């Protein structure tokens, strides 16, 4: 059974709620999934996972300069190498995600072997049918870029 790790950083409950939805969906699709806060994740959790989904709330101005929060950047910089793992991003937002995913990638690019192809976003912290389809494509290796 493929092991997945859903790591989230939430300022309010919305990103945590989205992480719960992702974790539940992965389990429903026969993955051994574990959801964990950015504060609680240990290097061995990441090392043991084959799929790592990283979530952060969207920080920035209403219409531009979206980026991961400083705390997310600090913790992510301490992650072990993610090369050889399927890595995806997710975020919750109020208005736009803008450059959020690009900035998440920029903070982790030295730890990744290839670009991140799964970028999930939700305004209401729910996992939409489109997001579920993207996760299925990602798991099966068909790519999932939106």
Image (spheres, grey):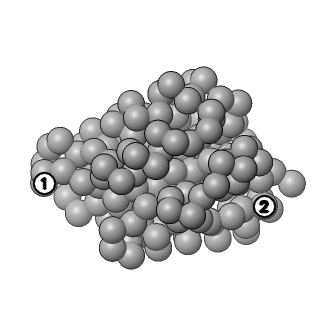
Left or right, 5 with reference to 40: right
User: Can you tell which quarter of the image residue 123 is in?
Assistant: bottom left
Q: Residue at x 70, y 30 (%)?
A: 84
Q: Residue at x 73, y 68 (%)?
A: 28
User: Can you tell which quarter of the image residue 137 is in?
Assistant: top right
Check if mark 2's residue and mark 1's residue have beta carbons within 8 Å: no
Residue under label 2: 32
Residue under label 1: 62
Q: Is residue 99 above or below residue 68?
A: above
Q: Residue at x 77, y 59 (%)?
A: 31
C-alpha span from label 2 to label 1: 37 Å
Left or right, 1 with reference to 82: right
Q: Pinpoint residue 17: horizontal percent, then vertical percent.
A: 47, 73
Q: Pinpoint residue 103: horizontal percent, then vertical percent.
A: 33, 36
Residue 113 at least partly seen: yes
The secondary structure type at the circle numbered 1 is loop
Q: Pinpoint residue 42: horizontal percent, then vertical percent.
A: 64, 55
**Of label 2 and label 1, which has the lower sequence position?**
2
Q: Quadrant of the N terminus?
A: bottom right
Q: Is residue 101 above or below residue 109?
A: below
Left or right, 60 with reference to 53: left
| Numbered badge on residue 13 | none
Crowd rating for badge 2 (residues with CA inside 10 Å; few <14, some 14–19, many 20+): some
Q: Residue at x 68, y 36 (%)?
A: 85
């Amino acid at each position: 059974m493929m092991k997945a790790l859903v790591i989230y950083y939430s300022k309010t409950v919305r990103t945590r709620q989205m992480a719960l939805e992702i974790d539940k969906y992965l389990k429903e699709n026969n993955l051994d999934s574990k959801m964990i806060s950015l504060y609680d994740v240990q290097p061995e959790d990441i090392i043991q996972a084959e799929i790592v989904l990283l979530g952060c709330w969207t920080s920035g101005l209403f219409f531009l300069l979206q980026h991961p929060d400083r705390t997310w950047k600090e913790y992510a910089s301490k992650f072990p190498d993610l090369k050889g793992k399927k890595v995806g991003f997710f975020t919750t937002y109020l208005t736009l995600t803008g450059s959020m995913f690009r900035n998440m990638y920029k903070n982790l690019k030295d730890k990744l072997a290839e670009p991140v192809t799964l970028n999930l976003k939700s305004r209401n912290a729910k996992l939409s049918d489109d997001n579920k389809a993207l996760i299925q494509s990602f798991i099966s290796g068909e790519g999932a870029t939106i």
